[in-house]
Image (spheres, rainbow, N blue to C red):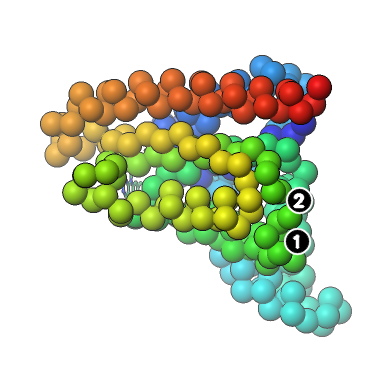
Amino acid sequence: MTLFRLDASIFPDQSVSRELADIVEAEWTAAHPDEQVIRRHVGTSPLPSTAWADAVVGQQVPQDARTPAQQAAVELATTLADELIAADTFLFAVPLYNYGVSQHVKTWFDILYTDPRMNEGGPELRGRPALLVTVSGGNYGPGSPKEGWDHSTSWLQRILVDVFGLDLTIVERRFTLVGVNPALDQFKDMADAMRVEALRAAEVEGRKLAESDARKAA
Ligand SMILES: Cc1cc2nc3c(=O)[nH]c(=O)nc-3n(C[C@H](O)[C@H](O)[C@H](O)COP(=O)(O)O)c2cc1C
């Protein structure tokens, strides 16, 4: 069994998404102590944004006609696709930045999606279990003033579920900037409850993810 983990926080040392994903990973590792975790941290080790166009164009010309940059980009896409195909289970820890995913996450997906295996919808990935940890400084829940402004979670769901066919569970924590941004002080009780619920959900859903893998391995 292999777990693929993607992190995207640009402040990993004080990251809520990392904290929650660490809980999920700990549950998985407890059930699979000697098994592999493939990691990619696009927040601290971003992929080159120019690689996307090079990979798109590079895929359209014969290998011996590619520029060195195009060849490197095609190879990078192959590596990213290999990482996903090698995994049985997936963990994505992605904060909301500027009402969407960061350029780092979009670049990862854009390069990955130039690989012909992914471009066909990643048939190898269909039905595999995945957990998305999504966090945001504000609250975008039903009835909130900015309901519908979180274009990260909805986009990730579209890609992970509808494009790649993953069996996705989401653990979310909103209002992470309560206690940091004084304008949000009135929401302290709500934010505290959301924090407790997110920590509980990470543990419960992490254990379920690990147990479903353990059943498959048996
Ligand atoms: C550059 C930047 C942009 C952000 N944009 C948003 C945003 O549009 N909406 C929001 O609710 N929070 C936003 N936040 C807050 C983050 O979502 C929040 O701090 C989250 O906890 C970050 O994830 P992390 O704790 O895993 O690092 C932003 C934070 C940064 C640094």
Residue situated in front as seen by the camera: 43 or 92 = 92
| 97 on left or right of 88 | left
**Disc 2 C-beta below 8 A from ligand 1:** no
Give the x, y percent position of residue 202.
49, 26
Whether residue 166 is situated above or below residue 73 in the rendered picture: above
Residue situated in front as seen by the camera: 161 or 97 = 161
The residue carrying pointer 2 sits among few (fewer than 14), some (14 to 19) or many (20 or more) residues within 10 Å by Cα, namely some
| 17 on left or right of 113 | left
| Ligand 1 positioned in quadrant | top left
Tell me whether the residue at label 2 lies in contact with that at label 1, contact meaning CB atoms closer than 8 angstroms: yes
Name the element at disc 1.
helix
The tag earlier along the polypeptide, 2 or 1, is 1
The disc labelled 1 sits on which kind of residue? Arg
Name the element at disc 2.
helix
Q: Quadrant of residue 61?
A: bottom right
Work out whether residue 115 can be spotted: no
The disc labelled 2 sits on which kind of residue? Glu
Q: Which residue is mark 2?
A: 124
Which quarter of the rendered picture does the N terminus lie within?
top right
At horizontal 51% and vertical 21% (from top left) the residue drawn is 203
Residue situated in front as seen by the camera: 28 or 205 = 205
Give the x, y percent position of residue 24.
56, 26
**Disc 1 C-beta below 8 A from ligand 1:** no
| 10 on left or right of 196 | right
Which quarter of the rendered picture does the C terminus lie within?
top right
Q: Which residue is mark 1?
A: 117
